[in-house]
Amino acid sequence: MPTTMAAVDLGASSGRVMAGTLSGGRITLAEAGRFPNGPVEVPTELGPRMHWDVLRLWGDVTRGLRAAAHDVGPLESVGIDTWAVDYALLDAGGELLGNPASYRCPRTVGLAEKYFHVVPAEEMYRRVGVQVQPFNTIFQLLAETPGRLSLARRLLLMPDLLGHWLTGRSVTEVTNASTTGLLDPVTRAWHPDMLQSLTDECGRDVAGLLGELVEPGTILGPVRAPDLGLTTPSGMPTPVVAVGSHDTASAVVAVPAQRDDFAYISCGTWSLVGLELHAPVLSAEALGANLTNELGVDGTVRFLKNVMGLWVFNEAVRTWRTRRMDLDVPGLVREAATREPLRTVIDIDDPAFFPAGDMPARIGEAARLTGQPQPRDPAETARCIFDSLALAYRRSLRQAADVAGRDIGVVHMVGGGVQNELLCQLTADATGLPVVAGPVEATALGNIVLQARAIGAVRGGLPELRRIVRASSELLTYSPAAGAEATWRGVERRLF
Ligand code: ADP
Ligand code: LRH
């Protein structure tokens, strides 16, 4: 019997609701809804503030779920994943206390450094093992006003908020909780010392705001949102399953690896570049390389680096379009492939590229500061971004492998960015490793395959789930070009 499930997958630049039908050991995806996403900027007395339009997203999600049930058939279950770290605060009546802030909001500038006077960075890393980013939930909480915090009764991370609206249950799914900076990656529970220090800093009991922690695969309960009318084929209300609710956790479930020595690059707005481990690495070397230990499905750890990603390219495209330049992404990628390789290579992880804005100008400035030629047009700029991303992938994978004491035999690239064939080939050349590209919709597939197991439609661990993903995906392999290693080693030395 085919089993149909729906994945709600919200990325920072787009969201989708996908119906997935499992039949004969494969999943067929059907898109039931796709919609743009992005932070909304508003001016305030304190400067610009950036929010997510969560009520519009809720409308898009529920419309997509209705369409999935209508177009594909009754849903056996629903799972939700979104980008990490961001959260909503609810008051005593369960009402939203304002639109959730976006992790790109400048409200957190300088707060990590301030917090390190209370808990030194080394100590924090030993406790929670996360890459220091200004937007880790802990630093966002330090940016909250006392007024909002005093009204708050519950904090829900984005996927947990949507799950709460669908089912009435308030939980914190653990893969996403691991990006907060408050979770102990060894015990997979809140770190009491981190909660205490945050409580001291905020002047408010933080532990009381946090929901019960659940592991991915937990069934939250039936959809109770009344006008949705979602039912299973047997007429029962459709259950919501807590999947790897951090989108990167779901994407890594769907890495179609066949061997143990694989690395992955989840390639979307961000590039998440790293390894799957069975225990966190909390060493000084890991901290020094700013590698993060995020929690994965089935007790795994995602030991990875957040690389600035296709965000830089997307923002550049947005900038050109505001100047009325007529550009399409596949065309630009094709043109970039014809431009001089490695003419200009920048440090793509420079914090200058984090805020929204004029990326072509910032890239020009980075080129000038490092004595390199400035890209002259969009195709050269795009080439510079893709070359620079590939260099960052090389560095990050080598650091992760060195620090974890592991060898890498193959790199799996998953997510929307694998449609960029130039980037896939550059990644093979820069890393000196074969790159297996696909699936594009890894996050939705990882979300669905975990639901399938939670509701008993499939059995087994990650290797079995990945077998289903492999059977459901078209994969392309890119081999490193002869002589590429010497070239990329040279470029790396030139820049770092
Ligand atoms: P997210 O989940 O972070 O929103 P996705 O996994 O959907 O990201 O990937 C979106 C990215 O994929 C875009 O940023 C874009 O750069 C890239 N992309 C999408 N379609 C194409 C295409 N046809 N060719 C090349 N790149 C593409
Ligand atoms: C990717 C992602 C990433 C986080 C960032 C905030 O969508 O979840 O893993 O670090 O968004």
Image (spheres, helix red, strand yellow):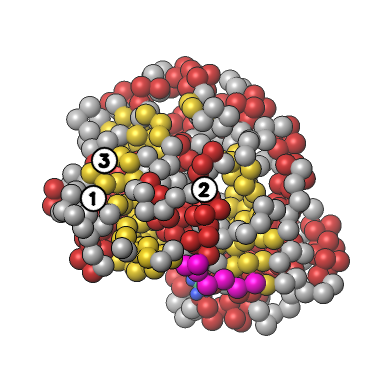
Q: Identify the magenta region.
A: 471-477
In the foreground, 95 or 50? 95
Tell me the element at label 3.
strand
Rendered location of residue 186, percent (x, y): 58, 29
Of residues 351 and 430, the one nearer the viewer is 430
Q: Is residue 378 magenta?
A: no
Q: Which mark is residue 238?
A: 1
Of marks 3 and 1, which one's residue comes earlier in the chain?
3
- Residue topped by disc 2: 461
Residue 61 visible, this orientation: yes
Amino acid type of the residue that numbered disc 3 sits on in the rendered structure: Gly
**Residue 208 in the image: above or below residue 448:** above
- The image quarter containing residue 392 is bottom right
Q: Is residue 39 left or right of residue 153?
A: right
Distance of label 3 from label 1 (alpha carbons): 8 Å
Rendering coords of residue 160 (x, y %)? 35, 41
Instruction: Name the disc covering residue 221, or none.
Output: 3
